[in-house]
Image (cartoon, helix red, strand yellow):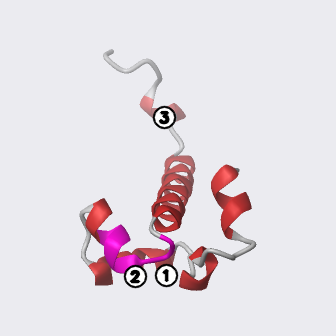
C-alpha cells in the first residue's frame, strides 16, 4: 500500500475540523495584517471580497475583531 495508514483508520470529521481551524487562523492572520481591510485581505488571499465575507461568516470571524485597538485580535493570532 502507498499510504502509511489504513483508509479505515482515517477520521473525516477530524480532517474537516482541522481544516476549518487552519482556515480560520489563516484568515484571522491575514485580516490582522491588513488591519481589517477586507478588500485588501481578499486580494492578498486571491479571493473575491464577497467570497471572503462568506468564509468569514462560516468561520465566525467578525470585521470589528481586526481594528487596530481590538482586544480579541492579539490573542487569537498568537495562539
- In the rendered image, residue 25 lying in the magenta stretch gets the answer no
Which residue is painted at 66% across and 67% down in the image?
Answer: 73
Which residue is painted at 40% across and 82% down in the image?
Answer: 53
Q: Residues within 10 Å of mark 2 (few under 14, many from 20)?
A: some
Do the CB atoms of the residues marked 2 and 1 lie less than 8 Å apart?
Answer: yes
Quarter-of-image position of residue 76: bottom right
Which residue is painted at 60% across and 84% down in the image?
Answer: 64
Q: How far apart are marks 2 and 1 (CA)?
A: 6 Å
- In the rendered image, residue 39 lying in the magenta stretch gets the answer yes
Foreground pick, 74 / 47: 74
Q: Where is residue 23 in the image (x, y as percent from the top left)?
A: 47, 58
Mark identifier at residue 57: 1
Q: Where is residue 68 in the image (x, y as percent from the top left)?
A: 61, 74
Mark identifier at residue 8: 3
Q: Is mark 3 on a helix, strand or loop?
A: helix
Which residue is painted at 31% across and 17% down in the image?
Answer: 2
Q: What element carries label 1?
A: helix
Q: Magenta span: helix, strand or loop, mainly? A: helix
Q: Position of residue 71 (x, y in %)?
A: 75, 72
Question: Would you say 70 lies left or right of 3 here?
Answer: right
Question: Would you say 1 lies left or right of 23 here?
Answer: left
Q: How far apart are marks 1 and 3 (CA)?
A: 33 Å
Foreground pick, 46 / 54: 46
Q: What stretch is highlighted in magenta?
A: 35-42
N-terminal-most mark, 1 or 3: 3
Amino acid at each position: 500500500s502507498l499510504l502509511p495508514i489504513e483508509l479505515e483508520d482515517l477520521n473525516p470529521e477530524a480532517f474537516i475540523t482541522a481544516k476549518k481551524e487552519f482556515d480560520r487562523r489563516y484568515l484571522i492572520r491575514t485580516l490582522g495584517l491588513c488591519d481589517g481591510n477586507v478588500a485588501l485581505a481578499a486580494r492578498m488571499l486571491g479571493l473575491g471580497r464577497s467570497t471572503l465575507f462568506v468564509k468569514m461568516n462560516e468561520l465566525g470571524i467578525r470585521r470589528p475583531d481586526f481594528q487596530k485597538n481590538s482586544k480579541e485580535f492579539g490573542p487569537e493570532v498568537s495562539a
